[in-house]
Amino acid sequence: MKGKIKNFIEFVSKNNPNEPEFLQAVDEVAEVIIPFIENNPKYQNKKLLERIVEPERVIMFRVPWIDDKGEVQVNKGYRVEFNSALGPYKGGLRFHPTVNLSVLKFLGFEQIFKNSLTTLPLGGGKGGSDFDPKSKSDNEIMRFCQSFMTELCKHIGADTDIPAGDIGVGGREIGYMFGQYKRIRNEFTGVLTGKGVNWGGSLIRPEATGYGNVYFAQNMLNYVGDDIKGKTISISGSGNVAQYACEKSIELGAKVVTMSDSSGFIYDSEGIDTEKLQFIMHLKNEKRGRIKEYADKYDCEFHEGRPWVIQCDIAFPCATQNEINEEEAKILIDNGCICVSEGANMPSTPQAIEIFQKSKILFAPGKASNAGGVATSGLEMSQNSLRLSWTREEVDVKLKEIMKNIHTACVKYGKQDSFIDYVKGANIAGFVKLADAMIDQGVV
Ligand code: NDP
């Protein structure tokens, strides 16, 4: 078996040179799916995995724009339309200087399995740009978004490919891109999700990834007879996912003691309460400042680096990929952490995951635990098609139900003698639905 997995990884690596993040994501899936295929003849001799690792289409384009000084700037734009067996391509857009094809292929690949897990009719895709929104004026952001969409609008559509937000792309950017799409295509459709609520957006969509992650953790804890109430939680990041993971954790009676950004983390031993969280939301969403200002205002600790050195019962990594390494995983376990639920995509390195799994703590991979965001995007698409808006309560009930169903699917395929292997469970549950659809649709 090891030989088969090794050969497959070598094959993917040879076909996709210099794409370490993509290979990391494929490796995790191959370790689980190749043995599964070996035991299930239905999935053999169809080159399913070989087909899944190859995107259906990759679009790369130039994004020229003019900055406030009147100088011409040029960025790279991408859309990876990875797999449409289960529905139109669906996945976010990331604007960050570290964006390249490897990062977007890893995100798009993960997205296929995640979207399959949601049980909604969604294919997988991802896109973005190496544009850095930090310290750009609103007008610069608008001009960039308009230029980006001028090209992207030729390739997407409400029944073809429906992008959403990700790192560096929030409500403001989605608004500028939607405006440009509408202007060029002359159609008001649900082509993007994460829209403003008074022009087609869904209630709870901004909250959904963070809330969904907390719901998933609560499902894991309940399954072993425990509860999130009274737990001390460490969160990384202070963007969209982190903010709402924090909000829901507070609401459910937990104490959140850390949040971070790329310059460091704050440690508030008293716990971040609702009022302090409002300060963070204003700081990050309106002022676009640094998390250190929280420590200055509330007279608590600020440290460079990542928050995993702080004692906690539960960790919610909600910033970016590979933000918990082996060393940090060991520190978390030594400090008594019992649950890690990934809000970000692939925040734990493979070595860190190995430590979590050997310790048999509750560990949820992002493709399961952060699927609430895309699931609610799916609900936004349904509301757009129906020309209806559901209430906050209706959407929240559906989100909770979806997270519960994803948990049940992970348990079904990941149950071991003494613990649940959520990585195995998520990958197999995601694969089965996808593979069945691919078989039904023939070799395309
Ligand atoms: P935001 O841009 O809103 O926030 C990102 C946060 O992470 C910021 O605090 C940012 O700090 C920090 N961060 C980004 N890059 C790094 C880095 N290299 N090192 C340290 N900190 C970093 O993004 P989101 O909250 O939307 O996304 C966070 C994660 O969640 C990503 O992995 C994303 O793919 C994933 N995700 C998001 C979904 C969504 O609905 N938005 C859905 C599913 C997954 P700074 O401000 O300093 O850059």
Image (cartoon, rainbow, N blue to C red):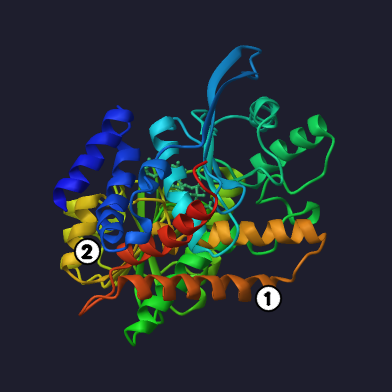
Q: Quick one: 372 or 326, which is closer to the camera? A: 372
Q: Which residue is mark 1?
A: 393
The three-letter code of the residue at mark 2 reads Phe
Residue 134 visible within the image: no
| Residue farthest toward the top in the current orientation of the protein | 71
Q: Which residue is mark 2?
A: 356
Q: Position of residue 253 (x, y in %)?
A: 45, 80
> Dot 2 lies on which element?
helix
Q: Position of residue 320 (x, y in %)?
A: 39, 47
| Residue farthest toward the bottom in the current orientation of the protein | 225
The three-letter code of the residue at mark 1 reads Glu
Local crowd at mark 2 within 10 Å, few (<14), some, or many (≥20)? many
Residue 284 — which label?
none
Q: Is residue 173 left or right of residue 98?
A: right
The answer to the question of whether label 1 and label 2 lie on touching residues, with beta carbons closer than 8 A, is no
Asked if residue 285 is positioned above or below residue 137 in the image, the reply reads: below
Number of numbered discs on residues: 2
Q: Is residue 424 left or right of residue 229?
A: left
| Residue farthest toward the right in the current orientation of the protein | 186
Q: Quick one: 302 or 286, which is closer to the camera? A: 286
Q: Position of residue 374 (x, y in %)?
A: 56, 56
> Dot 1 lies on which element?
helix
The residue under the point 25% across, 42% down is: 8
Local crowd at mark 1 within 10 Å, few (<14), some, or many (≥20)? few
The residue under the point 20% across, 79% down is: 417
Q: CA distance from mark 1 to mark 2?
A: 35 Å
Residue 358 visible within the image: yes
